[in-house]
Image (cartoon, rainbow, N blue to C red):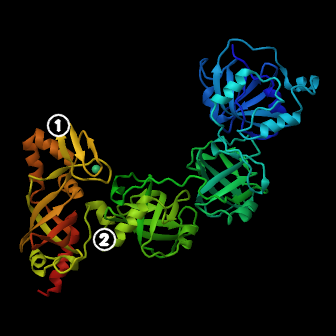
Amino acid sequence: MSDLTVGVIRELYEGPEGANTMPYAPVVQVLSIKKIVSPNGPDRHRLILSDGQCFAQSMLATQLNHLVDGDENAPIRKHSVLRLVQVACNAVQGRRIIICLDVEAVAHPSTKIGTPEDVTKFIEHNPAAGGAPAQAAAVASTTANASVGAGRGGSNASSTTAAKNVPAAKPAAGARRNGSESVIYPIEGLSPYQNKWTIKARVTVKSDVRHWSNQRGDGKLFSVNLLDETGEIKATGFNEAVDNLYDVFEVGKVYYVSKARVNIAKKQFSNLSNEYEIAFERDTIVELCEDQDAAPQVKYNFVELASLGECPKDSTVDVLGIVKDNGDLSEITAKATNKQIKKRELTIVDRSGYSVRVTLWGRAAETWKDTDNGVFAFKGAKVGDFGGRTLSMGGQSTIAEDPDVEAAHALRGWYDTEGHLNEFTSYNSSMATSGAVTFKKDEFKTLDEVINSGIGMQSEKPEYFATRATITFIKTDNLSYPACPTEKCNKKMTMEDESQWRCEKCNRTYEKPEYRYIVSIAVNDFTNQIWLSGFNEMGLQLFGRTANEMQQLREENEDEFSIVINKALGTMYNFSVKAKADSFNDQVKVRYQLQKAAPVNWVEDAKVLAEQIQAMSV
Ligand SMILES: [Zn+2]
């Protein structure tokens, strides 16, 4: 037999409006459940809750719908006993409604407990029972640390026990600045049934101001996405709210937002999964939060530019890059709307050796401040396949300069020390068809020129050249090495016993190594031969298989392994090579390291040859 928290229904009914961080977790019984079908959104559920003494109307927050939408074994059903973890009280159409934001089912007795009375009638009959309303209100509005007030004369032992077992309720109750008494609400707790709330959230996206005009008139609007620990929600302001609030919001900053309406989300205009969205109103209050670390930062899931080829068209990605070229502001006319749109195409590069164009639109294109090789994070960029691969920033995308994430610091360091010397492979249109890389013809050297010019010998810094040559030999004895599988480690591991591989750097053992290529190949042209070395990416490109696969092939099917190697022999590439002097036993030797290998584009490269022949005037 479950004990109910006698008196709590009246307490909630007479307590203050708004969110209620319960100082204890009262236990009540469900007397009935009624489903209210809503044409414009998720269904709602009306519950009658009883504490054994009184019953009152309650609504279940829609995020708890799954607790009732089941069979007769659903967690919430008729006669279920629930622990109220978090509730809010609202006056809806003149009646007080208790909204269940978070509940736990405790037991499922088969009958009604006690003989509860309608709470309004009960108050009429017992005007002073259970302590003065003011006192009850004081209990309900205190913080989670408050003890249960004496006014709750009806409380029993079980409710006290329950309070100890329940973790502190979710929203951080506490006075905001200016002495305002609003409770900070989690974004996931917002619903149309509460009207007194404040959220503390970081702006992750801010749209341009958009204007519209139709037969009913014209107007303007903007929207922001707001993020806290519990979720993300879109908020939109129309007309006057644009004037009041557009300039207040800054992407990346944390704000208190209160006095706005919560509506059913129009998902066709949003990429968020929240069932609701916020509409700013005339008296909506937005204040900058004094503690800017108080809400979570935007999370990135960066994709390397070299991997964009694997991302499907129209997917969205996060990329981090150095802006090599700021592009020019231009204007195009959109075919669909016949409107002029501002446009700018940035070129970004990253450590993967690729460069890609990123298109900014509208205000983002206009307000872009030219940067000299700055690090920028592009979140939610859309992948296009125009000219190989391009990226486009849409209404839900964001750009952050120098984000305070490790990847950004690493990229900065890499670019300043060596990246700025690199050549980058661009996703251009010829790539889309042939995978070729366009080299400048004056960068090409014959192998004789490479050897006799002493390139790489002169300075400490590496030098670069391009050459067109054919693979004539591939060293197979050390094609790959057993590497540490930890991301970004790649250190060589040693075998301790048959199932234990050890990485000294990470100081741990693994069952299996991750093989990585160390390619060593001889290439020839009509003038000479040189040896080139390359790393994992080169092996992947030359053999079309991972080093793990090749290792396995070699162990299990030597013939097939030879076939793969031989297939790579005799193929011609445009190679981009880094030349750097190495001293070994007092001997200085230039090592040639493969940067990239692009299959020869016969048409384009023949045109270059034709130009060269013409230039010779023969
Ligand atoms: Zn390691």
Q: Position of residue 571 (x, y in %)?
A: 12, 60
Q: Position of residue 543 (x, y in %)?
A: 17, 52
**Place of residue 7 in the rendered image (x, y in percent of width and height, measured from the top left):** 81, 25
Query: What crowding class fits label 2: few (fewer than 14 Cα within 10 Å), some (14-19), or many (20 or more)?
Result: few
Query: Mark 2: is the Cβ under 8 angstroms from ligand 1?
Result: no
Quadrant holding the C terminus? bottom left
User: Residue 418 bears which disc, if any?
Assistant: 2
Going from the N terminus, do you reach mark 2 or mark 1 first? 2
Q: Secondary structure at mark 2?
A: loop
Whether residue 246 can be seen here? yes
Q: Which residue shows up at 45% across the image and 56% down it?
A: 318
Q: Is residue 17 above or below residue 536?
A: above
In the image, farthest residue toward the bottom: 617
| Front in this rendered view, residue 297 or 281 | 297
Residue 214 shows in this picture = no
Between residues 156 and 370, which one lies in front from this camera angle?
156
In the displayed structure, 265 sits above or below 422; it is: above
Residue sitting at x 30%, y 71%: 418
User: Would residue 524 appear left or right of 304 to someone viewing this image?
Assistant: left
The residue indicated by pointer 1 is 498
Query: Does the beta carbon of the residue at mark 1 sit less than 8 Å from ligand 1?
Result: no
Pick the front one: 597 or 458: 458
Kind of residue indicated by mark 2: Glu
**x and y percent of residue 608 in the render?**
20, 76
